[in-house]
Amino acid sequence: MDDTVTGLTGNLFEVYLKPYFLEAYRPVHKDDNFIVRGGMRVVEFKVVETDPGPFCIVAPDTIIHCEGDAIKREEEEEALNAVGYDDIGGVRKQLAQIKEMVELPLRHPSLFKVIGVKPPRGILLYGPPGTGKTLIARAVANETGAFFFLINDSWRGRKTYSVSAVNFNGCIDPALRRFGRFDKEIDIGIPDATGRLEILRIHTKNMKLADDVELEEIAAETHGHVGADLASLCSEAALQQIREKMDLIDLEEEHIDAEVLSSLAVTMDNFKYAMTKSSPSALRETIVEVPTVTWDDIGGLHNVKMELQELVQYPVEHPDKFLKFGMQPSRGVLFYGPPGCGKTLLAKAIANECQANFISVKGPELLTMWFGESEANVRDVFDKARAAAPCVLFFDELDSIAKSRGGTLGDAGGAADRVINQILTEMDGMGAKKNVFIIGATNRPDIIDPAILRPGRLDQLIYIPLPDEKSREAIFRANLRKSPVAKMDEDDPVPEITRAHFEEAMRFARRSVSDNDIRKYEMFAQTLQQSRGFGSNFRAEQAVLKIQHKAIKPFKMMEMMIFIAKFMSVYLITIVVCILIGLHYHSFSDSSINSAMITMGAYGGYLIILVGTFFGIIMGTGVERRIDMFYSVVGCILFIIAGALILDHFANSVYRGSLRDTGLAKGCISIVGGILFLVDAILVFRGEV
């Protein structure tokens, strides 16, 4: 550089370069700048050309040419800022429009004069930060040889052209956007996979890449990344490669071993790590993620999984097949079913299988008290989803924002109806959908507006049921697959115990198992008893028993009512028959003792049986059947004892012989009624009634 060799005389090669490269085997690259200290001066050199390739290592037999005039610092800085169309990727269509709108008026203004129209005076570039708006403006100026000002300048000349850039064109005054000022507005949007591949090739052209690096795969997995994000991704990958070699680098040494430098090469694993640390700058306002949930994390629901693969995964992975057969894939699906059955988990799993972004929106989060803000929130969510395509947009608690229109007359000017209208407009795709799949989840599909469920919107309805026995077993295996499980638990009837429970209850059981085992281990540590046997294996039965009360949800209550109806249908028949016959004989009795015995035997037995039945149902099924059976048997025995007491009382009576027959009949009825209760209870618990 000219400013570092001022006043120097003599042979620069002998004084500076030869000692610097002598037996050092230093790697160099074309356009590299390096500093050499020697002769009480610091001189900066630049590698202008290397032969045969852009990379080389200077060996003792390498020929170094150091002739000609020194490079001027001003020219070097201008060259660093010089960019052209070849330095920009991912905006091929936009560059074609810009060339048409900018280069033609600047290079050939006479064309517009001959035609008799005024040439366009400016364009407005808008788009998310980092998409390359300023870079495009610099490239246009360099390609056309025009002066470039990074300011808002109102000076107008014959051959001037104003190019402005904003992140959001809605913030510009309409007077500035009219014709004659900014004649054209060009959206510099988020690049697609092809555009990202072009940008990656530009940013990695000077990087030393390992053979396993697949830029096509990286471009396919970096949804929503703009040029600045991809540049940061490449930089982070290179830094990760350096971190891996830090144990071979001595920071105290001035020079790094040439073998270490030659071994540096950015690998695919470095890019994978960088992708975990990188997030799209255009989507940081919205929680966008590629979930880590897989099908293995979801137990059961095999039919639902298969249907989701056909609806979501196949169109994303095989769009050419759908195009070949002229098929339009479904754009939305509605999950409905009991709470906690895995609706959100299924949405995350299908997003992960497709390697698509996942945006989860809670319905009430979109609603605000300000006029028009709720609709704007809906519009913004859909815009973010399109920008992050392929994307799964998941609306949880859809019924909170999509209730049938016309039923909310008391709200602020029909705000709820306006939100639904905005959702319908976005689902219809006023703009390009760009491979966005919408999933809604609700517990109340009956109150959702029918327009949302028509074909072309959420046209596929999938019921997520309570898990059956095989599904419950699969849920337990999925949640316990990373935990040590005792072998004796493999044959335990856990799916039978947890009948009518759902997936979240199964997860609570797994957590309770862990807590219970840890509690045992703490007790062992405190009492210093045995050194083994605690904390090594999980036992499921105690935790399952613990969650019985906590698992009563609305759908559990529905099953409980069904059970009650089944029990009562059997019990009430016997109760009504016995009471009617008992009251018939009681009307002919004058004995208060007789009345008390009948009341104690009949109604006491009925009460204990019903309390036991209800208590058993509330506690759940499975192990608690023993408790229920115990109460029922106790009630039946009490009923039989009451009948026996009545028989004994009247059999030993010497008064009013006519009543002896009446007592005999009443006692027989009580005994027969108790036996009927006992038989009914056994049949019901065996599932035969």
Image (cartoon, rainbow, N blue to C red):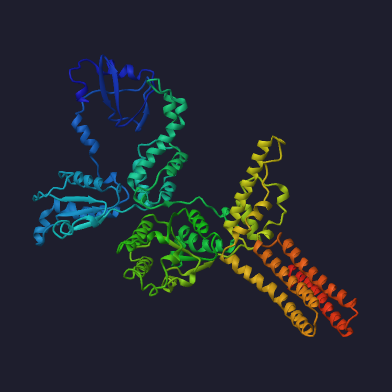
In the rendered image, which quarter contains the N terminus?
top left
Image coordinates for residue 472, horizontal then vertical, percent: 63, 58
For the point 51% across and 54% down, the residue is 353
Q: Is residue 535 visible?
A: no
311 or 60: nearer the eye? 311
- In this figure, what is the number of numbered marks? 0
Q: Is residue 612 above or below residue 286?
A: below
Position of 537 with respect to 248 (left or right) is right
Residue 94 location in percent, x, y? 27, 54
Relative to 224, 78 lies left or right? left
The residue nearer to you, when weighing 176 against 514, is: 514
Give the quadrant of residue 58.
Answer: top left
| Residue 518 % position (x, y) | 63, 43
Q: Residue at x 30, y 19 (%)?
A: 17
- The quadrant of the rendering that contains the C terminus is bottom right
Q: Residue at the location (48% across, 72% down)? A: 446
- Given residues 550 and 174, the one toward you in this image is 550
Question: Is residue 472 in view?
Answer: yes
**Lateral position of residue 362 relative to residue 535, left or right:** left
- Residue 223 in the figure: left or right of residue 484: left
Q: Taking 233 as reference, is 178 above or below it?
A: below
* Residue 642 picture location, percent across and down: 81, 72
Q: Quadrant of residue 115?
A: bottom left
